[in-house]
Amino acid sequence: MTGVVDTSAPPARPARLVDDFAPPLILPGAHQLCAGCGEPAAIRSVVEMIDELGLTNRAVGVFGIGCYTSFSPGMDVEVLQALHGRAPSLATGLKRVQPNTIVFTVQGDGDMVNEGLQEVIHTAARGEPVTCIMLNNGVFGETGGHMTATTVIGQRTKNSLEGRDPKKHGYPIRMAEMLAPLDGVAYVARGATNNAGNIFQLRKMLRSALQAQADGLGFTFVEILTMCPTGWFLQTGEAPDYLEDKLQAYHKLGIIKEVAAP
Amino acid sequence: MSLELLEGSEAIARAMISAGCRFFAGYPMTPFTEVLEGMAEHLPDVGGVCVNAESELEAVGMAWGAAAGGVRAATGSVGQGLSLMQESIAELCFARVPMVVLNMARGQGDYYQATRGGGHGDYRTIVLAPADLTEAVELVQLAFHLADKFRNPVMFMGDYYLAHVVEAVDTGPRLFPPLGPKDWALDGSTSGTGKARIVSPIMPTKRDAEVFIEYGDYLEGMSGRMAELVAGVDPLYEQGGCEDAEYVVVAYGTPGRIVRYVVEKMRRDGVKVGFFRPVTLYPFPAEALVAATRSARAVGVYELNAGQMIDDVRLSLSDRPITFIGGISFDDSGFGIAPELTPAKVEQRIIKAMAQARAEMAASAEMVA
């Protein structure tokens, strides 16, 4: 219906409050993340895909430690809070004893690639039917912008002030490409939250990964490039383009592995 | 009751399954390895899961996830492997996740690690230390009961001897008072209900909870948790010959068993000596130790280390001379087989310490005169 709003009578339904527009499974109240952060859109995409697939009453999120941890009490989804780096092992134990659950982990690049790299590799190689999600912004956002193992070459951080130099700091790890070749891995993709088109693609990736878990195909992994204007020392509005120009140049978007259902 | 002749590790594994343990994860390290072998063999028979973890860090994490799913779960290692798990053990206390942690120690050098812990923050774990297999199969089952009752990790302190000694034991289920349902455990069923559960060491409530708990308040509450453990866990101990003893020897675990043997022999020889063996290392049976040493002039502590439990003995007894009569004893095997741990050598140490205590008493009496 288009045209002039009819004000001759009270509206058919009363005016709605902001909370009425809150996405499903996100609890009312503000998250504590910075303006321009790419993580809320990522978390929202995850829980909305769980909702869309009708998996809500089987879902448990296992959270690592980072800025995104403020969502651990902020979702109407069961949460198991893990230590820094250790979420994939907790997810393994939970899924093994409650096989009907849909278990997803949320970790940052510092959590997954720096602190707990071997956890996710072994979980993938064991083919644990869980979905590991990595929010990759190339910095330790919570500490204020320090170098991680995925920080791209040339990227300035508080402990690589002149930009990441391979001679001093080594090369970044491409996590999705590292996990994809392992047997037991059913789905691997890398998406981003820097524009609507990428979020649309990301939602399809998350949907595929969660569906693959529900179908018992094996380990699934979605890496999500997220903006961190605070940790990148940029104006909020510059962060989406920085992500595309710098991070995406090294960490390419797309579906890297997709094992078809038998 | 059906007695079977079993090696310690096998008996402990069977008793854990009798206690309802249905998830186990571990990384091999002798003498813990044999328990892992037993769990890998027997757990699938009862529908349980045993995962060969790729590290101790992952083992304790997997058991954490399984325990959060409401299943009785356990892991363990030797002191070195448990060093790697300390961060998780501390946070399991904060997250109030019940778990049994086997500490199949080599010598007794890990008393501090077991009773104080090497993790961060204000936490304690209940610690149970058996001296023989009959006690071990009881205590490992009690460990699961206490873990669930207090929603706190419980450490079961075995040792090299306990793991490898062969004794006739009944590993069948023991009865404990019923516990309430695990209405905090996770299975996904509360997601989307507006009351989704959270199991977290840092955020015990969802942000829309009717009673929201701040992190600081939660941590402050942990001090109450430790008082709850001290008040709620019955202190367990064994004593003998203490009624009229002029000297009491305190020892735990396998060395406690050997001290018991030596003291019983010395009493038959007419020596007024007693022994006291703490079974709960935390909470430490302090009041019972005070009562047991009422007639003693002096107290000796025998441990296979440089003197660790002696701290808890000193904290319990303020008015009695306390001497350390143990020592580090090691052989080429590296497993703390302890050449010093022979009855004849233990007896010599007790005789020497008693003579010294008598001499000191006489000297101080002379000074008073």
Image (spheres, rainbow, N blue to C red):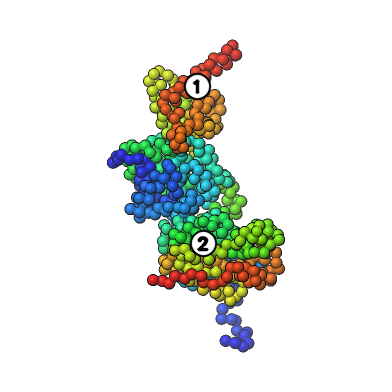
Amino acid tagged 2: Thr
Figure quadrant of residue B234: top left
Q: Residue furthest bottom?
A: A3
Taking the view exactly as shown, the residue that stands out farthest to the top is B369
Q: Which residue occupies the extreme front position in the image?
A: A167
Could you say which quadrant of the image residue A150 lies in? Answer: bottom right
Which residue sits furthest left? B2
Q: Mark 1 and 2 residues: CB-CB less than 8 Å, in contact? A: no
Query: Can you say whether A63 is above or below B26 in the image?
Result: below
Q: Can residue B188 be seen?
A: no
Q: Is residue B92 above or below residue A104?
A: above
- Name the residue located 30 percent from the left edge and 40 percent from the top edge: B4
The numbered disc on residue A105 is: 2
- Residue B1 position, x and y percent, is 29, 41
Q: Is residue A18 visible?
A: yes
Q: Is residue A192 left or right of residue B290?
A: right
Q: Which chain is indicated by disc 1?
A: B
Q: Position of residue A163 (x, y in %)?
A: 68, 62
Residue at the spot of label 1: B353
In front here: B217 or A90? A90
Label 1, label 2: how far apart the Cα atoms are: 59 Å
